[in-house]
Amino acid sequence: MNPTFYDGLFAQKHKILQKLLEAAAKKGAPVVTEHLYKHGQDIFYAGTEPFGVYYIHHGAVKLFKSGKAGRQHITFMGGKGDLFGYRALLAGELYKVTAESLVDSKIAFIEKEYFVDYLGKDPRLAHLLLKSLSVELGDVEDRLLGAVQVPAEKRVAR
């Protein structure tokens, strides 16, 4: 695919998420609040309940799981214009990952009830999230297949 395809996709994503933010901003707090996170500051923790979703105005965020040896396994890295924290919310689960700011970041928090209600009213947002979740699932399948195809000796060595 050519770069103009990705530029168009990013512009479409930006437009959809801007409409969500504008609609939430009209409602004001507590529907949407903005927070500044310092480098290395946690945004949410694995094992906690999701109360909303997050939008990155500027900065960078990583989502990670900690392994048995305390080693971090990064599952997502996002930057300006990205939405995160919605997978657990939509699944009705606790967070399975921790979110941490990689640099000083300004992040909007949109409360759960408003987000779910808005999602039901905007099919473009629903489609965007379905597409995002499908891409994430494809990446996980590729990594899993890659791990399975590694010879047993190499898997044991890891």
Image: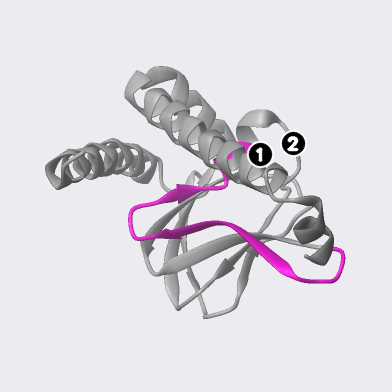
| Residue in front for this viewpoint, 33 or 74 | 74
Q: Is residue 36 above or below residue 43?
A: below
Residue at the spot x=76%, y=71% of the render?
A: 71
State the quadrant of the C terminus. Answer: bottom right
Pick whichever of labels 2 and 1 is earlier in the sequence.
1
Residue 51 in sight in this render:
no
Residue at the spot x=29%, y=39% of the render?
A: 13
Q: Is residue 131 above or below residue 76?
A: above
Disc 1 packing (10 Å; few <14; some 14–19; many ≥20)? some
Instruction: State the SS at label 2.
Output: loop
Mark 2 is on which residue type?
Answer: Glu
Residue at the spot x=22%, y=43% of the render?
A: 6
**Where does the image place residue 18, in percent across and percent down from the top left?**
28, 43
State the quadrant of the N terminus. Answer: top left
Give the residue pinned by disc 2.
93
Tell me the magenta residue range. Answer: 68-87
Q: Are marks 2 and 1 in contact (CB under 8 Å)?
A: yes
Instruction: State the SS at label 1.
Output: helix
**Where does the image place residue 56, in percent across and percent down from the top left?**
41, 58
Give the residue pinned by disc 1.
88
Q: CA distance from mark 2 to mark 1?
A: 5 Å
Left or right: 107 in relation to 25: right
User: Quadrant of residue 14 in the image?
Assistant: top left
| Residue in front for this viewpoint, 119 or 12 | 12
Q: How is the image coloured?
A: one colour
Q: Residue furthest left?
A: 4
**Where does the image place residue 32, in percent across and percent down from the top left?**
46, 49
